Image: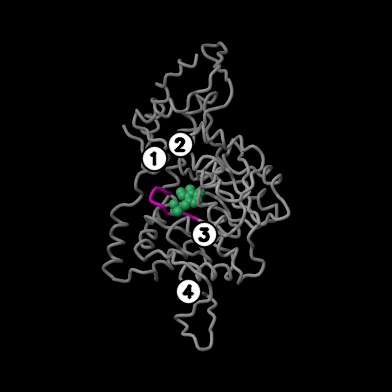
Amino acid sequence: MQVKLHDPTFGEDEIKAAIDVLRSTYVTSGEKVKEFESKFGPYAVFCNSGSSANLLAIATLCNPALENHLSPGDEVIVSALSWSTTIWPLIQYGLVPVIVDIDPDTLNIDPKEIEKAIGPRTKAIMPVHVYGNPCDMNAIREFGLIVIEDCCEALGADVGHSDFNTYSFYFSHHITTLEGGMVVANSTEHADMLRVLRAHGWTREMTNRTHHEGIDDKFLFINAGYNLRSTELNAAIGLVQIEKLQGFVNVRRRIAANLIEDFSEYDQFLSVQKDMGSSWFGFPIVVRKHRTERIENGAVRLWNQRIDVNDLRNHFEKNGIETRSIICGNIARQPGMKLWPHRIVGNLEHADHVMSNGFSIGCHQGMTEKSCEYIKNVLDNYNWKQYD
Ligand SMILES: Cc1ncc(COP(=O)(O)O)c(C=O)c1O
């Protein structure tokens, strides 16, 4: 049996929707894009990836056309367990990422660490809902800073809404538009800026369009924009997929509940993510740090050695269960981070531990109870005895 990290979420319905769009010849961003955006509320802006969604949010916050915009040197608190493009837009706009550790149980940014990190130039927090597991947003919002929620792994989870929420519809995510992303603001002013920056810096998609004497309204450029638009094809696929989202998330939650039970037998050696209402982007597993003990045949048995994560991972792979590292590991340890100004708070021991002792397996709509039984079997057949 094979248990893949992800299976395609789309099929004939989506293919037909895309072909219909092609046949119509109305392929560039238009009515389908608007309809797809409306599923995410009035301030939603569809773009070509989750990374672009993050870039647009940061570009908006830093834009000199807006009052109280962020300036180079301002600090944004991020989790050590972030995706690369959670953080690169901050750097690209001259902001300083301040990297803090995670809560080892949830794998999310630890609000206690945020508190330690706040300094005179701290303006914002950019939390990631790691593997779809909602962060403690009440605690995070209490700091009174701007909040940009990177929800790129968390579609379908109860993540609430902050100044900006960003989503990804990459192929392997909860739903897909092949590539694609959504950034959701909470004001017309921000949504308008996102639309201006998404397309060339022109005004065409603004709610409140401006006019300038002597300049053609269709070719009025009011800001330094990109072209990060998607297409009608991608939106048409998204419209079919969004109707399936809840069903997909329900399956992911069922599979996760099964896996949590299966792994509970090995709780002394392996920890799994504490579920805070997750939509289960995948199923992360972390080898525990310390010597452990368990009752076997009525006697306490000590295990002196930590499980060798690579050996366990190879065992899964050899048996057809695909694995991968958890996000980027500790982003502070990535070479790209070292090139740019940033600040690290504390020793990031929990994120380091996840990086060197964690991996994940699939948890998605293509899996069944049989997949879980198979995973349990493979787990039971691992050579635990070598650690006696
Ligand atoms: C937390 C997080 N943020 C941002 C992204 C970027 O999304 P995309 O791949 O659509 O650019 C990802 C991608 O998986 C992610 O996991």
The alpha-carbon separation of the residues under discs 4 and 2 comes to 41 Å
Q: Nearer the viewer, residue 355 or 293?
A: 355
- Which amino acid is tagged 3? Leu
Q: Tell me which label, 1 or 2, sits earlier in the chain.
A: 1
Q: Is 87 left, or right, of 25 in this rendering?
A: right
Question: Residue 385's quadrant in the figure?
Answer: top left
* Marks 1 and 2 close (CB-CB < 8 Å): yes
The alpha-carbon separation of the residues under discs 4 and 1 comes to 38 Å
Q: Is 164 left, or right, of 10 in this rendering?
A: right
Q: Tell me which label, 3 or 4, sits earlier in the chain.
A: 3
Residue at the image position 44 percent from the left and 28 percent from the top: 310
The alpha-carbon separation of the residues under discs 1 and 2 comes to 8 Å
* Marks 4 and 1 close (CB-CB < 8 Å): no
- Which amino acid is tagged 4? Glu
Q: Is residue 118 visible?
A: yes
Q: Which residues are magenta?
A: 167-173
Q: Tell me which label, 4 or 1, sits earlier in the chain.
A: 1
The N terminus is located in which quarter?
A: top left
Residue 205 marker: 4
Q: Under tag 4, what secondary structure? A: loop
The alpha-carbon separation of the residues under discs 3 and 2 comes to 27 Å
Which residue carries the number 3 mark?
55
